[in-house]
Every structure is written in C-alpha cells, then in structure tokens.
Amino acid sequence: MYTKEYVEEIDGINFPGKTFQDCVLAPIFDTQKNYYAKPFIKISKAHAVMLYEQKIITSDEANEILSGLNKIDSIDMGDRKYDPSYEDMFFMIEHELENLIGRDKAGRLHIARSRNDIDICEFRMVLREKVLEVIQALNTFRQVLLSLAKENITTVMPAYTHTQPAQPTTLAHYILAYQDSLERDFDRFVHLYNTINLSPLGAAAITTTGFPINRQRTAELLGFAGLVENSYDGIAGCDYLTECASALMIMNTSLSRFMKDTLDFCTKEFNVFYLSDPYVQVSSIMPQKRNPSSLEQTRPAVSKAIAEAKCVFDILHNTPFGDIVDTEEQLQPHLYDSVKYTVRAFKMLSSVFTTLQVNKEILFERAHEGFITATELADILVRDKGLSFRHSHKITSLIVKHLVKNGKKAKDITPQLIADISEEILGRAIDLEVAEIERALDPVNFVGIRTVTGGPAPVETERMLENRLKTLEKNQQLFKEYIEGLEASDKKLEAAANIRKAE
C-alpha cells in the first residue's frame, strides 16, 4: 500500500525526500552542470570585480574569491552527481568556495545578489549563444539558396497556386521567395538577440539591494548590451523566452513548407531535384530505389523543433508574474532542443542544396503544359484589342475549355478559334496573328515581360539577387560583431579580475 508510513520510509522526513531528489532535484542538477556551471563562474567573477570596484569588499577579499573561482572553474563538472547535501549546483559551488577560502570570505561574494537574478542571467547568457548558433546556420543556408538562385535565373518552371500549375516563373524567383522569408527570420532573431542580451543582475531577489552596486558594470563585463532596467521585470519577465519560441516556430513552420515542396520535387513523378549519392539510401530489397532519406529524416527534426518551442507557451501560460520555477531549468532545455533540431535541419539542407542537380529540361517542358500562359493571352486581348479584362478572361476561359474537351493543347490555339469564340461572346470577331498567339503562349516571353518590381523577369530577378547578397553580407558582418563582442567581454572580465593587492 502507498501509505504515509511507506512514503516516509522511502523518502525520510527531512529535506530533500528521496522521491524529490530522483524526480526533480537530480535532473535539474544535470541541466545545471551541463549548461550553467561556466556562466555561473563568469557571473560570480563579474560580481566580485564590481563589489571590489564599489568598495563593498576589499582587494584581498576580491583576490581570494577570484582565485577560488578560478580553481573551481578548472573542475570538470561532467562527472559530478547530485549530492543531497546541497540543494542545487549554486550551493554546491558555494560550498566548494568555502572549502577553498573560508566560509566568511566566500560569503562576501553573495552580497547584493540572489539565486533569482543569477539564474536568469545564466539563462540569458546560454540562450544568446544558442541564438547565435541558429543565426550562423541560417545565414549559411541563405548563402546556399542565393547561389542556387544565381544558377537558375533563366530556369523557367511552373509556379503553383492551390497545388496546381498556375503561371510560368523561374526557379530563381521561387528560391528567392523562400530566401526572403529567411531574411525576415534573420531580422526576428536579431531582435530576439537584442531582447535576450540585457542583464538582470542587480535585481537580486526582485527589488534590488541597499548596497551601492553598479549594475551597468556587471552587464559590461558579461557582454550584455544593457540592463533589464526594472528589477521586478528582470525577475518576473519571461517574454524573452516566448519571443525565442515564437521566432523558432515561425521559421521552422516556413521551413517545413519549403521541405514539403523539396520532397515533392525529388519524387520520380516530379523529377525536378536529383539528390547526390551521400544523401540518399537504397532500399534493402528494391535495388532501383533512391530514397531521399536525408530529407525525410530532417523533416521530423523540423517538426520536433516546432514542438519543443511550443512547450514554452504550454509551460508558461497561467503562471504568476513573479519569481517562479516554471521558467527555470525544466523549461530552458526545450528551447535548447528546438535550437538543436533547427541547426541540424539547416546544416543538412545546406549540404543537400549545395550538391543537388536541377532538371531544367523537365521544368521547361512543364512550363509549356496546362495552359499556364493563358493569362498572357487574356492580357493581349486587353492591351492590344481594347477589351475589358472580364471579357478577355471569359473568351480565354472558353478557348481553354474547348481545347481540353477536344484533347488539344495550348499550341493548337488558332486565329480562327479566337475569332469564333470572341464572335460568340462579343458579337464581333477578334483577329490575332499567329505570331501574336505564339508570343502570348511562350513561357519565356511570359516571364521576360514581367519586369514589374518583384517579378520573375531575369533582369528583375538579378536585381533582387544582387540586393539579397548585399543584405546577407551585412547580416554576416552583424553576426561577426556579436561574436567579437562576447569574446571582447570575456577578455575584459579576465583583465578586470586581475586585481592588484592592497599595499
């Protein structure tokens, strides 16, 4: 029986109970040691430097604290197991420091800080690194797509609406369309990085402290661009988490749609993309099969990225606006896993799209099928013959229905057919020359005359491509600046931690 006596026999009657250890505290400790040990040491160093500079602790105290932190930093936390003697990693490291420099001096480090602001600072430090991983993989894939677009400026193909062939376009026009959504994703992640890259340190428990600390200094030493100014917001605000989850879900949802097209294009029926051998698997029984397994395995990774990010909203809704464990170690790894699957997907797709072959001939053939240039025939009746578009649309629609009914194709449209149907609709015949009809039905001409901003005409696509390449170059430079900024702050922290002993 699961009785009080039975539970107390297993768990004991003092903190922490065995069940609490196994189900909560030990898994949380594993997350802490895997992700937060190094950030915790950096935060502690920055705090010690600031306390010294503000004359809250002496140089001797600061030096001993920093020396002890350096020794702890050299310990491999990977082998550490949860010890019920300490509630969590914070208290375990604090105990290590006490053993090294004495309890009184170690305790000086905890002036004007709390686990609350330390934890959130750790979360922000780790998450900004994860965001930079995404940005790097995202920019690489964008570069791959822009190279593919450049190679296919004149690769005419059908554009699809409602999954049906609609009008001629080019593969470059299609690729650029998806790349542009990735460019907006980049902008979202830049905004996200700027949201995350603010320091909560100094908020302490939630209302700051009576000590004369310098919040800006710890932010500077840890590479933050500024502060979460309101201390209550610094502890309670978790929209940096939901913003991250949103950006990941938006990007991966678009990516999943692009992957749907890609897998369709790899089918024998479409026969548009041919994957290189490193990215296909042969059936165990059917020797002719070339299964696009690299893409099939990537598709669920994208789905998992979306699912893990969505967990953030599921966990956070209806929680109090204050310090609450729901935002902490059990939530954060969902974002890390979402990032992991996202980066995997981008890396896989970057390799696949760099090496795939495009069947340009089949795309060109299909651009001549299905009457997809009929819009231009209707447009000619408007531009050259002065008809309203509704009349031209009706005439062209009847022409297409007539051809379909009689098993004919667009090339079978004749001046006489146009004259007969226009006579039926308008009461007068419209005369078009054979050359005019052929030009209207030519998919290359269809594409070439669509020079309106954003259209598929090669001259316009080349302009867009050139602009996108310039934008990507600027985006990559911004990523480089983020990386260099964090590296510079690490050097600044180490230099500041080299405190001269008092005379």
Image (cartoon, rainbow, N blue to C red):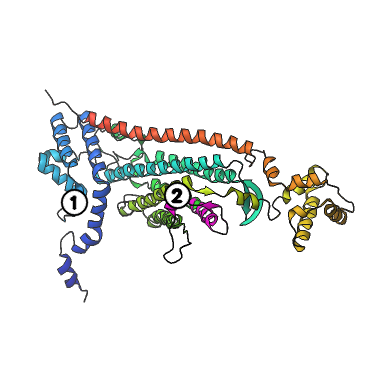
Q: Secondary structure at mark 2?
A: helix
Which range of residues does the magenta coloring cover? 255-284
Residue drawn at the location 58% of the way across and 37% of the way down? 464
Is 499 placed above or below 69 here?
Answer: above
Q: Is residue 29 magenta?
A: no
Kind of residue indicated by mark 2: Ser
Looking at the rendered structure, the kind of residue marked 1 is Asp
As drawn, the label of residue 246 is 2
Mark 2 vs 1, N-terminal side: 1
Image quadrant of residue 163?
bottom right
Quarter-of-image position of residue 490:
top left
Question: Quick check: 62 above or below 339?
Answer: above
In the rendered view, does 76 fall on the left or right side of 396? Answer: left
Position of the C terminus, as image quadrant, is top left
- The one nearer the camera, 162 or 192, is 162
Q: Residue at x 73, y 56 (%)?
A: 409
Magenta span contains residue 264: yes
Residue 71: percent from left, percent from top: 15, 39
- In whole angstroms, how far apart are the C-alphas of marks 2 and 1? 35 Å
Q: Which mark is residue 34?
A: none
Q: Quadrant of residue 69?
A: top left
Dot 1 corresponds to which residue?
Answer: 79
345 lies left or right of 69: right
Residue 309 position within the rendered picture, expressed as x and y whole percent measured from the top left? 41, 53
